[in-house]
Image: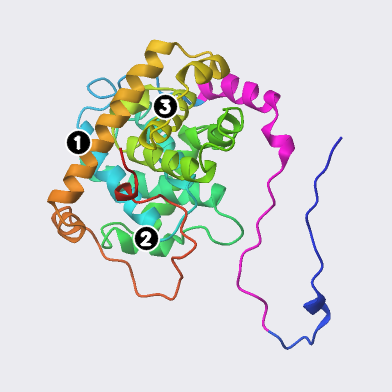
């Protein structure tokens, strides 16, 4: 068994007790073992367990519409962006949202409460250390339209409906596994491709039509869209070989992503960001000292060029 340990003991570790600890969060170094082919194969097998394969609007949900879902998803994305959450938090929260809506009917007045509970759970699972979104802060972001008691109750309700199976597979989990297997060395900055693909995944999570694609399909097409946006080949054939996804399905998803991003860019150009937030009823964040320089979600869509 190969174990990777990147821990280092700093010279300052033995200094006086009265010195305040450094506020920076320490994260694990990348482990090359997690990039092996067996990990990709395991994710491809497991993703089906967390997929939403049927349209729950008009069947399970009588009051909730795709437009309502989009509004709540955009609000959830704004919260994640504003709090500098890890890029995996938002797609995982949306996965919880869709899995819950596919099994349990809710009223229109409960959709934001459900989205808030999903954000709380996803941040607890994917944020490092003690950086999970506080429940009180999430209540504030709803303009106090929900109570802390409601949020805690719905957190347990979501967990019970998901059968406590919350370690779901998202498109973000496939990105490093696919990028390392594409012939990109010396052609492009893979970190840039990774960031752009993360942006496309976050934007696609807002629209219900992308929910019917598997996580591996969305990840593959987001990478291809990022590469094509940088003037390179999308490597759909290679992605097809790696994931065994039908090539026509990949091509269709890729075209939808590119159309979505192009429409998003045109909207950002025509409507200033502040006016768009005001029109959507955006609740501004509380005053705090948290630095946003470490924000990982997501790259601004204006930084993606086609």
The C terminus - image quarter:
top left
Farthest-out residue, right = 1
Q: Position of residue 299 (x, y in %)?
A: 39, 50
Numbered disc 2: secondary structure: helix
Numbered disc 3: secondary structure: helix
Q: Nearer the viewer, residue 44 or 226?
A: 226
The N terminus - image quarter:
top right
Magenta run includes residue 34: yes
Location of mark 2 (residue): 82
Q: Residues within 10 Å of mark 3 (few under 14, many from 20)?
A: many
Q: Earlier in the sequence, mark 3 or mark 2?
A: 2
Q: Are marks 3 and 2 in contact (CB under 8 Å)?
A: no
64 sits left or right of 139 in the view: left
- Of marks 3 and 1, the one in the foreground: 3
Q: Earlier in the sequence, mark 3 or mark 1?
A: 1
Location of mark 3 (residue): 221
Q: Residues within 10 Å of mark 1 (few under 14, many from 20)?
A: few
Q: CA distance from mark 3 to mark 2?
A: 27 Å
Q: Are marks 3 and 1 in contact (CB under 8 Å)?
A: no
Q: Residue at x 72, y 43 (%)?
A: 31
Magenta span covers which residues?
A: 20-49
Colour mode of the rendering: rainbow
């Amino acid at each position: 068994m190969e174990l990777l340990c990147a821990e280092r003991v700093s010279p300052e570790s033995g200094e006086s007790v009265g010195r305040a600890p450094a506020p920076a969060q320490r994260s694990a170094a990348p482990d090359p073992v997690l990039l092996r082919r067996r990990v990709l194969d395991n994710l491809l097998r497991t993703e089906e367990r967390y997929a939403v394969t049927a349209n729950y609007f008009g069947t399970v949900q009588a009051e909730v519409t795709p437009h309502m879902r989009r509004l709540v998803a955009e609000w959830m994305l704004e919260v994640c962006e504003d709090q500098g959450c890890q890029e995996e938090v938002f797609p995982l929260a949306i996965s919880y949202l869709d899995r819950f809506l596919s099994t349990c009917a809710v009223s229109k007045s409960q959709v934001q409460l459900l989205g808030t509970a999903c954000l709380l759970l996803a941040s607890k699972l994917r944020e490092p250390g003690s950086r999970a979104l506080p429940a009180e802060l999430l209540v504030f972001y709803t303009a106090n339209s929900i109570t802390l008691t409601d949020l805690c109750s719905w957190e347990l309700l979501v967990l019970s409906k998901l059968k406590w199976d919350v370690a779901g597979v998202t498109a973000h989990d496939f990105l490093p596994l696919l990028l390392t297997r594409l012939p990109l060395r010396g052609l492009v900055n893979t970190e840039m491709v990774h960031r752009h693909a993360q942006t496309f995944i976050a934007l696609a999570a807002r629209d219900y039509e992308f929910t019917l694609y598997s996580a591996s399909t969305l990840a593959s097409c987001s990478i291809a869209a990022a590469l094509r946006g940088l003037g390179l080949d999308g490597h759909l054939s290679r992605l097809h070989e790696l994931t065994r996804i039908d090539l026509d399905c990949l091509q269709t998803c890729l075209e939808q992503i590119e159309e979505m991003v192009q429409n998003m860019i045109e909207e950002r150009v025509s409507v200033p960001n502040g006016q768009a937030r005001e029109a959507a009823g955006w609740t501004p964040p509380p005053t705090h000292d948290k630095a946003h320089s470490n924000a990982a979600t997501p790259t601004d869509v204006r930084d993606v060029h086609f």
